[in-house]
Image (spheres, grey):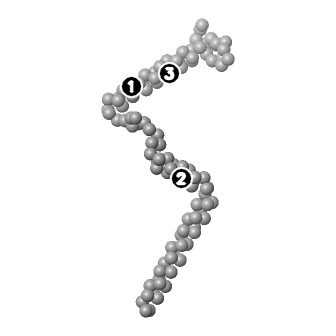
Amino acid sequence: MAQGARAKNATDEPLINRGQRRRRKRYWLGDASAIKDQLAASGLRLVPQPYRPYSDIWLLLGVLTSAALLSLGAPFWFNALKTASTLRPAIAAAVQTRDDADRAR
């Protein structure tokens, strides 16, 4: 077929573009294997071997706790932080009155 010829398929793409796509795919696969070889030669391990996800029960518990706390949402955390920020002056005042009472004795 000529360069401008059209294919009779579902996508109706020019045949020349499909061939270019195949060549590009092979090119990228070649790059991926070259990068993999370079990483293997450098000794850098991206994933520890053997890979054991959540092998430690405390790690799994931490992930589940974090997910549960995040699911409470922004309004909850806004109110919790606002309450925590008002506790500091209240605690400081209580400590001050206790210290004053101790000095008076």
Give the residue at x 47% y 43%. 54
Give me the C-alpha separation between circle 1 and circle 2.
41 Å
Percent from the top left, x then y, of residue 17? Answer: 57, 18
Percent from the top left, x then y, of residue 104? Answer: 44, 92
Question: Residue lying farthest left?
Answer: 42
Q: Are marks 1 and 2 in contact (CB under 8 Å)?
A: no
Q: Are marks 1 and 3 in contact (CB under 8 Å)?
A: no
Asked whether, in this view, residue 100 is left or right of residue 41, the answer is: right
Where does label 2 land, which residue? Answer: 65
Percent from the top left, x then y, of residue 63? Answer: 51, 49
In this rendering, the label closer to the viewer, 2 or 3? 2
Q: Quadrant of residue 100?
A: bottom left
Give, as a three-letter code, the residue at label 1: Ala
For this rendering, which residue is in front, 19 or 67?
67
Above or below residue 72? Residue 38 is above
Q: Earlier in the sequence, mark 1 or mark 3?
A: 3
Above or below residue 30? Residue 92 is below
Give the residue at x 32% y 32%. 42
Give the residue at x 47% y 80%. 95
Question: Residue lying farthest front?
Answer: 57
Visible residue check, residue 46: no
Where does label 1 land, which residue? Answer: 34
Quarter the C terminus occupies? bottom left
Q: Quadrant of residue 18?
A: top right
Percent from the top left, x then y, of residue 23? Answer: 49, 18
Give me the C-alpha separation between circle 2 and circle 3.
43 Å
